[in-house]
Amino acid sequence: MKELKAWMDHKIDGASKKAAKMSSGNLGMNLLSVRLVGLHEVGGLLGGESASVVGVGMSLLCEPPMHFLMLMTPEARTAVVEAVTGAGSATDEELAASILQEMGNILGSTMANALAELFERVVQTSTPQVVADMAGALLSGIIAGLGDIGDEVLLTDVEMTACGNAVDSRIFLFFGDQLHQRLIPRVREVYSEAG
């Protein structure tokens, strides 16, 4: 997986620069790790399946289909929104949703572009959706929409900061067994070609 982290590092750096520009330098991101986690572990990564979370998701429209999901705590949602628009602004639900959708666009498009480059094909994205719910319910909806996604998902551990403070969030990429079997070998191939 070190190849996958090295390959994704500069992709997340580009997303971080876009987020910083959107927030006058108040938002930042740093890639910590990229790893496969069991599907059964995902709900527990932000406090358990019954924990309240905010999800920003988008479908990556390709064959096979994939889904990008950023999960964050409600406190992280507030911190991200206020990093862009100022203290107290997170109570404006429409404004908050717009900011989170833009964060979804930045990160989801980063993942889509990385996969498009990796597999040398077009990967289009849907409009990001923002949903507040329990972690388990959010994940169940995504899994039901994708069908057979296999036993693992790609977890991109990105340390996100808002006004210099770490915010609790996770970024996932859900994909089927067919892509899973090709992802790591293809990253190794591209990474060895690059350097």
Image (spheres, grey):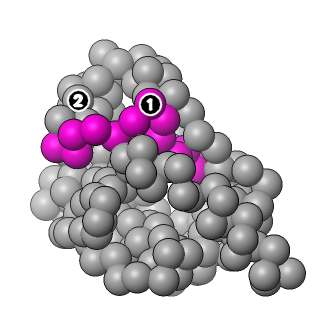
- On residue 159, the disc is none
Which three-letter amino acid code belongs to the residue tagged 1?
A: Asp
Relative horizontal placement of residue 134, taking residue 27 as reference (left or right): left
Residue 102: x and y in percent read 31, 71
Question: Where on the picture, by quarter, is residue 161?
Answer: bottom right
Task: Write the residue at 31% across / 28% down.
Answer: 135
Question: Where on the picture, by quarter, is residue 52?
Answer: top left
Judge whether 115 appears above or below 142 on screen: below
Q: Give the total of numbered labels.
A: 2
Q: Nearer the viewer, residue 180 or 94?
A: 180
Label 2: how many Cα within 10 Å (few below 14, some 14–19, many 20+): few
Q: Which of marks 1 and 2 precedes in the sequence?
A: 2
Judge whether 37 appears above or below 189 on screen: above
- On residue 140, the disc is 2
Q: CA distance from mark 2 to mark 1?
A: 14 Å
Residue located farthest toward the left when viewing the structure as drawn: 94
Asked if the stretch drawn in magenta spans residue 147, the answer is: yes
Residue located farthest toward the right when viewing the structure as drawn: 195
In the structure shown, which secondary structural element does the residue marked by tag 1 occupy? loop
For disc 1, the marked residue is: 151
- For the question of whether residue 2 can be seen, the reply is yes
The region drawn magenta spans 145-160
In the structure shown, which secondary structural element does the residue marked by tag 2 occupy? helix
Asked if the stretch drawn in magenta spans residue 10, the answer is: no
Which three-letter amino acid code belongs to the residue tagged 2?
A: Ser
Residue 91: x and y in percent read 22, 49
Question: Where on the picture, by quarter, is residue 187?
Answer: bottom right
Residue 108: x and y in percent read 39, 66
Residue 63: x and y in percent read 29, 65
CB atoms of marks 2 and 1 within 8 Å = no
Task: Write the residue at 73% across / 64% down.
Answer: 188
Task: Write the residue at 32% across / 54% down.
Answer: 67
